[in-house]
Image: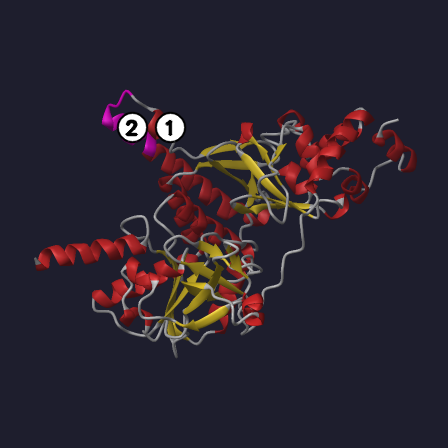
Amino acid sequence: MTKFDELKKRFPNLIPVQELRSNVSIIELAIHYGYSLKLDKGKARPVLENVAHNDVILIKNAQNASQQVYQRVGNFTDSGTIINFIRNRLATVFSKFNRSGEDEFKNIVSVLYDYLRIDPEQVDLNRRATEQLVERKLKPLFSLDLFELRPLENDNYLKTRHISLETINSLEFINRIATQITYFDPQKHQIVDFNAVKDNPQQNYILFSNVAFPYYDGVSTEVTGLEIRNENVKLHAPGSDKTSSVFVSNLPPKAEQFFILESAIDALSHKQLRSLHGDTKFNSVYFSTGGHITPEQVNSITQYINTSTKAPAWKINLAFDNDAKGYLYDLQFIQQLLVTKFPLRSVSVGQYMIGLALPTQETYRAFREDLLDRIEAYNEMILSQRTLSFSTNTTESTNLLISINQTTDQIMLSLPETNLPLSYFTKSLLELSGLNKRICINKSTTKDFNQDLQQEILTTSDMGN
């Protein structure tokens, strides 16, 4: 007897959604539809990959199907329960169940019913694979007591990145950066825990100095994590809260600008570039998200901004890297801010593409139609440029088009994961929502602001010679 038959005996009319969630694991369903386990990844949470659809997901609560949630790696908006997992992949992984004209939820339930009807022996095979994905260990709690921090040394790693002492000691960053000491036992050839060092002060150790950037969660004044950097190290200290916390500079008496960047080094570089160009005012707040972005980090940043004393014409500057990932972070930041005004739902649409389902409710109609008009205008511009160039190679321009897939019950966009379409789409969202009155995109000339700084210093040096 299949699991479907068992549930139908208990619920002859309609199987409740919670029962479906309890009896179908995201992991089992994913494995059944072509995902493979990545046992070498995911120290705290299991990771699965579908190579055919360029889809990598991580799972929380792996051993409890009713509580399982997933997140697509690199896209925090593609996350949630098994219902979200299926909904966001109806156009790809579960396309055979995506019947045009049918209610979307009915198509989702069809996927679950189909899995419940498979041979119980196959279910057991999928379940045995799931047993390999026990969450390895509880995430350690972060405590500053586990790390030795000292005032930042003058001769530190930041010097190799052309960050000046004047920038480090500026009103924005003074006392916001520290030296973190790592102890190495030459006899055991291993790094020693700081508590063990304190218990054995007579032991001879080799000391290494790192630069440490403290992270905060926007609620507490306590340090909730550390980003550790030197020539060979780029990591967050064990237990650091990378989900909700950000690095934040000192707050000015009245903030005129808020800059959000991927790294603290980029934040320092941006400040130094401003100073080199004559802008030395203490009127800005700098945030670093630590090389990624989550909805919780967006919430923490907005918490800081909302509680800051601000000048009347204050601005938020999204200053993520000048590459595809940076432009995607711009979009994800704005997407998070629009959850009530124009909720965009992330969906899986294939390799090197960003999928977004537009809200179809009547209340969003004006915004939706204006956005679709802009996308049509963008695509016409791309196609006209191809025509004007008389190029016989149409691949490049075709790869810049934003696809619109419209059915009776959904409108889905596919954006190439490249700078131009992502930039155009994000700016359209900003303008249509009115957020452009407060938020602007601020990109470096090169890949990031530290490269800009190095280039500026090199150019100045060449001119001096």
The residue furthest right is 9
* Picture coordinates of residue 122, whole percent (x, y): 77, 26
The residue at the point 28 percent across, 31 percent down is 385
Quadrant housing residue 438: bottom left
Q: Residues within 10 Å of mark 2 (few under 14, many from 20)?
A: some
**Secondary structure of residue under mark 1:** helix
Callout 2–callout 1 Cβ contact below 8 Å: yes
Q: Measure the alpha-carbon separation of dots 2 and 1.
A: 9 Å
Q: Residue flagged by tag 2: what amino acid is it?
A: Arg
Q: Which residues are magenta?
A: 382-392
* Residue that protrudes farthest toward the top in the picture: 392
Q: Is residue 141 above or below residue 410?
A: below
* Residue 398, numbered label: 1
Q: Residue at x 43, y 54 (%)?
A: 234
What amino acid is found at the position of numbered circle 1 in the picture?
Thr
Q: Determine whether 280 is above or below 51 in the image.
A: below
- Taking depth in this image into account, of 309 and 281 the one nearest to the observer is 281
> Is residue 348 visible to us here?
no
